[in-house]
Image (tube, coloured by chain):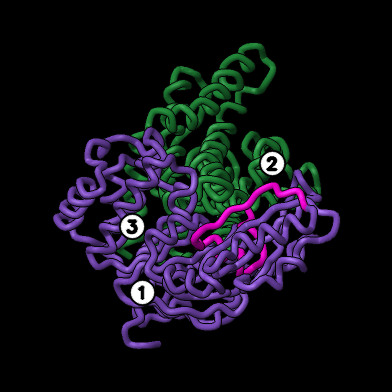
Amino acid sequence: MSRAAVLSVESLVKTYPAKGKAPAVEAVRDLSFEVRAGEFFGLLGPNGAGKSTTLGCITTLVRPTSGRIFVDGVDVARSPMEARRRIAVVPQNRNLDRDLSVREVLTYHGRYFGLPAAEREARADRLLTELQIADKASAKPLTLSGGQQQRVMIARALMHDPKVLLLDEPTTGLDPQARRLLWQTLGGLHKGGLTLILTTHYMEEADRLCQRLAIIDHGKILTIDTPAALKKQLPGGQILDVWARAETPLAPRLEGITGVMRLERVESHGDGEDVERLRLFVDPADGLLDRVLHAVRDAGADLHHVSLMAPSLEDVYIHLTGKELRE
Amino acid sequence: MTAFLALLRRDLQVASRNALPILMGTLTQPIMVVLVFGNILPRLHLVADEFRTVMVPGLMSITMLMAGVQGVLMPLVTDLAGTREVEERILAPISILGVAIQKVVAGAIHAGVAGLIALPAMMLLMHRVTGVAVHPRWVMLFPFVALSGLLSAAFGMTVGTQVQPRFSGLLFAVILGPMMLFGCAYYPWSGLQVMGLFQYVFLLNPLVFMSESMRLAVTPDVPHMPTPLLLGGLGVFTALFTVLGARSFEKRTIL
């Protein structure tokens, strides 16, 4: 483990054993990465990619099949209780103690971690204010909106002053306003020096918040870098989407055009099965668009859609996996 | 240990706030049974007068079993299948075994208190009825209530970690109902001699040991199981269910 790393995951493998008729599931296959202290790190990937399992292994809720995880130098498998003092989790499902008030949720969490009375009371007050839930202090969690519950879970997580905060798809199911407020909150925590690890399948979220990203699919890391560097990985620098219906396949005609660095077929489902959807990674200089459109016309194709855009993380993902994010 | 005590404190605080519904859930059944079997049926000469004395310790044990079900089993079923509030406990600095034992201890306190409230309530209801021989031997009562409470809670954990929510309705019909009817709550185990070797089949039911221990502590005039067998049964079942319950709790919480 390098000196600056606060979390290090080494060759993590998790296979859920076969259960009855259900076959064994290889959720995580040989995953390694490190997160530096103070970093905002993201695990990006579709549902079922292995993000939550990875998070589960880090938080001691999932027992790895093999591999090692260190949090702040503590071996998670060997000393789970020590590890739990250093991490905090905001889980995907809202699991606030519904029998307690919001304030008690925080103070009891402090008790579980052995905080002295004065400290836990003061910290609960501070966090309630910081996370803008002070007016809900005596309310029961279930009476709160999804966004408010999310903030209570963050406050609860921060009660024991963790080194690393892990958030499992925190904005799933939130309305756009609540999502933005949460992004602000997380940004603020990061500025305050906390190490954050976030799983998400929202590209915009990953792009906006994370300093470095691991793109995961089928339990493996496809790539790991800063969002900007990931986008630069794309050949050409721009993306040209061409959807057309043609007698003969269009792809071979477009592939050879100068300025087209690479061509991918995008899988599509549902309507327009006979429409060919092509994604061209292009260098748009010197009349490239003209050349492409000429080629389409020469083929006698019926052009349905054409768009030129700067690449997004989603494009990086599609480039890496050859498919859209699965829901 | 800090986390263990904090979790226990949380459970007791929440329980004390919900005292009224918990009390109602606990006391309704024994009070109704006392009214019907202790009052109406004897007046109609449909049951023998002695039955009143025999059923008091049995109803105490049923009350404790139901408290274990209410306090541990049902909450676990919904928690494990849906709310997952339990994850916060597991993420506290305490071992899984510690969390499991804490749940059993909290459930045992719940069950013990329920039993100890049911007893005077029943005595109060029957204090004018002649021929009821309920004479609690308090020194014996407390340890047996504690053991019975632990057994109820451990049983609740074992079953609660195994049952899927969609089958929880079946639980009463298939498991708890037969347990209560064949748990020597309404008849002493020694009386089952008339059934020959079948008497010993009843020993597979943990409630039998709870009922008989209450019989020993509360109605000394009614014959009860030999004390070593009693203690052995309570001990073995408590240990068995604690181990099974903790194991399956771990399986359900750590994947």
**Chain displayed in green:** B
| Depth check, front residue: A245 or B197 | A245
Query: What's drawn in magenta, residue-wise?
Result: A301-327
- Residue B35 pos. (x, y %): 55, 19
Disc 1 residue type?
A: Glu
Disc 2 residue type?
A: Phe
- Count how many numbered circles sit on residues in the image: 3
- Magenta stretch containing residue B21, yes or no? no
Q: Tag 1 or tag 3, which sits nearer the N-term?
A: 1
The answer to whether the residues at label 3 and label 1 have Cβ atoms under 8 Å apart is no
User: Could you tell whether A234 is left or right of A218 in the image?
Assistant: left
Instruction: Identify the mark at residue B167; answer none if there is no mark.
Output: 2
| Depth check, front residue: A263 or B201 | A263
Neighbours of disc 1 within 10 Å: few (<14), some (14-19), many (20+):
some
Q: Tell me the CA gap for discs 1 and 2.
A: 38 Å
- Residue B161 pos. (x, y %): 60, 53
Residue under label 1: A82
| Depth check, front residue: A102 or A185 | A185
Residue under label 3: A157
Badges 3 and 2, same chain: no
Disc 3 residue type?
A: Ala
User: Could you tell whether A269 is left or right of B158 in the image?
Assistant: right
Residue A11 to residue A102: above or below = below
Q: Nearer the viewer, mark 1 or mark 2?
A: 1
| Depth check, front residue: A66 or A151 | A151
Q: Chain of mark 3?
A: A
